[in-house]
Structures are given as C-alpha cells and as structure tokens.
Amino acid sequence: MTTPRVLRTPDEVRWFVNDLRRRGQTLALVPTMGFLHDGHLSLMREGRARCDVVAATIFVNPTQFGPTEDLTRYPRDPVGDLAKCGSAGATVVYSPEPATVYPPGYQTYVNVEQVSQGLCGDRRPGHFRGVATVVTKLLALFRPNVALFGEKDYQQLQVIKTLARDLELGVEIVGMPTIRESDGLAMSSRNTYLSADDRARALSLSKGLFAMQAAAKAGETDVAKLLALGLAPLTQANVKLDYLEVRDAQTLEPLTTLTKERSARVLVAAFLGTTRLIDNLALTVS
Ligand code: PAF
C-alpha cells in the first residue's frame, strides 16, 4: 500500500488533475468528512474498479452544520484516515482548511429546490444548501468521470444527482449500498458517539426498516400499515423519532400506497441521546 499524497489547495488539485488528463487517465472522486469506516472504503474500492485513479476528499464542511449541531465535536482521525484511503486505493487525498474553501468574501451557494425539502431538509435547515455547495465546488475542481456517495445519506444522494444533472457537470453520480455492522446497524461516523445502551437501542432503526421491507415483499402496499410496523421497534426501544416516512425513491414525493410501477424508499431519523442517526431501505412490492 502506498500512502496517498495530501493536497491542500485548489492549485495543487488543478496540477494533479491536469497531469492525469495529459496521461489520458480517468478519475473517480470520493468526497467524505473523514473518520472513515468500511462504507467510505467501499466507495473508494468501487471508484478504483471503475477508473484509473481515485481521489478522496476529507473536509468537515462547516456550511452543512446548523448552529446547534456537532461541527466542533465532529470526530476526526487524519492519520488513520490517510492509511485507510491508501489501503482502499486512493492516490491523493484533498484536505483543505475551511478558509481555503470559504475565504473571506465568499458568497456563492447552490440550492437544489424540491428534493432538498422535507425529511432532513426540514429538520436541518440549510444542511443541503451546504452539502450542494461543497459538492459542486469539489466536482468543478476535480472534474471527475465518476463521483461516489453512500445510499445511507439517501436524500443527500438525490440532491447531488439532481445538481449534477441540472448544472450539466458531465459526471456520473454513483450511489453505493449502505454498509452495515453484522447486527444491522448502518455504519456512520456518528456511531462513535453512542453509549453501549444507545448502541443497543439504535438497532431498532434497522429492525423497523427490515420489518417494513419484508412486509412490502410479502404484498403489503398500504403505507400507513407499513409505517406502523416500522414504528413498533422504535417505540419499544424508547428512541426519540425525528421522522419515519415512505417516499418515491427518485423524486422523494410522499407515497400513501406502494405500486410495482414506482420504486419506493422508507427513510428514518431518530435521536439516541443527543446523537441523531439516519437510515433507509428500498421497499419493493412482489
Ligand atoms: O456525506 C458526507 O460525508 C458529506 O455530506 C459530503 C458529501 C462529503 C459533503 O460534505
């Protein structure tokens, strides 16, 4: 394994990208906020399978955190992350300072209108504006052939697919399946905040989603009945629900009935203590 080269400025990225283009090589980009787990590494491995070179970014993006959120205590592990990026096939890691990305006088933001509404968009005002802005900047800077994101942040993935399409960025946005712990908990950098008790209660999220998925597969199409099934483990575990909703898998419009023609997704957010976790699954009617 070779340790990836760390790039700190847009100029360094441009030199790297221009050199790569001169050689005729293709590029996969994996944007992250660091504290990497197997979910992130699966994106880098897939990037390596699809392209000649993989670039990862590690940047805890301040514009996507609300004033009461966990920006200052967001977990960081720069040394460990670099080794993990190398092991998963990344050649470079772009890790700029916040003032490099948002210098004094910065005033340009990207707002993706419809898919940013509802769900996390309502609960975390300004969050997707921050995500869309930083991802657009990274895509414009790297001009990758492919950029990979986890389905765990499902609404974020739809926001990014929409901005790449609308702004004609010429990049393929690839969504990769959520990687789970052996007991079903979706991997997340925020799982590190959980106490042992919260960690055990957090299993109710995936338990509820899998119960809904099994019922849909068995023929249940009534969304109200499916939601009652998904809610039961959350109530039993006494977690504070933020939302549990069934939406169209692409447009994220609310659904009341599942049909074979329209793919559906169930999305959940809940608090375990002060930690907010999200998860989602596809619902397919047989
Ligand atoms: O999913 C994340 O880690 C972040 O939201 C992203 C896409 C890297 C933008 O900061």
Image (tube, rainbow, N blue to C red):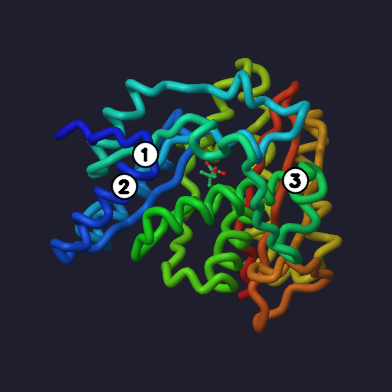
- How far apart in space, not on screen, are marks 3 and 1 (Cα)? 24 Å
Left or right of 242: which side holds 80?
A: left
Q: Position of residue 10 (x, y in %)?
A: 39, 44
Left or right of 21: which side holds 168?
A: right
Dot 3 surroundings within 10 Å: few (below 14), some, or many (20 or more)?
Answer: some
> Mark 1 sits on what residue?
94
Residue placed at 65% from the left, 81% from the top?
Answer: 260
Q: Are marks 1 and 2 in contact (CB under 8 Å)?
A: yes
Looking at the image, is 98 positioned above or below residue 246? above
Residue type indicated by callout 1 = Tyr
Q: Which corner quadrant holds the C terminus?
A: bottom right
- Marker disc for residue 55: 2
Residue type indicated by callout 2 = Ala
Q: Position of residue 25 (x, y in %)?
A: 19, 62
Residue placed at 65% from the left, 40% from the top?
Answer: 64
Residue placed at 35% from the left, 60% from the top?
Answer: 144
Q: Position of residue 196 (x, y in %)?
A: 61, 16
Q: Nearer the viewer, residue 252 or 110?
A: 110
| Ligand 1 visible in quadrant | top right
SS type, badge 1: strand
- How far apart in space, not on screen, are marks 3 and 2 (Cα)? 27 Å
Task: Kindly report which numbered mark, 1 or 2, lies closer to the viewer in this rendering.
Answer: 1
Sequence order check, earlier mark of 3 and 1: 1
Left or right of 186: which side holds 212?
A: right
Looking at the image, is 102 positioned above or below residue 275? below
Q: Are marks 3 and 1 in contact (CB under 8 Å)?
A: no
Dot 1 surroundings within 10 Å: few (below 14), some, or many (20 or more)?
Answer: many
Dot 2 surroundings within 10 Å: few (below 14), some, or many (20 or more)?
Answer: many
> Mark 3 sits on what residue?
126
SS type, badge 3: loop
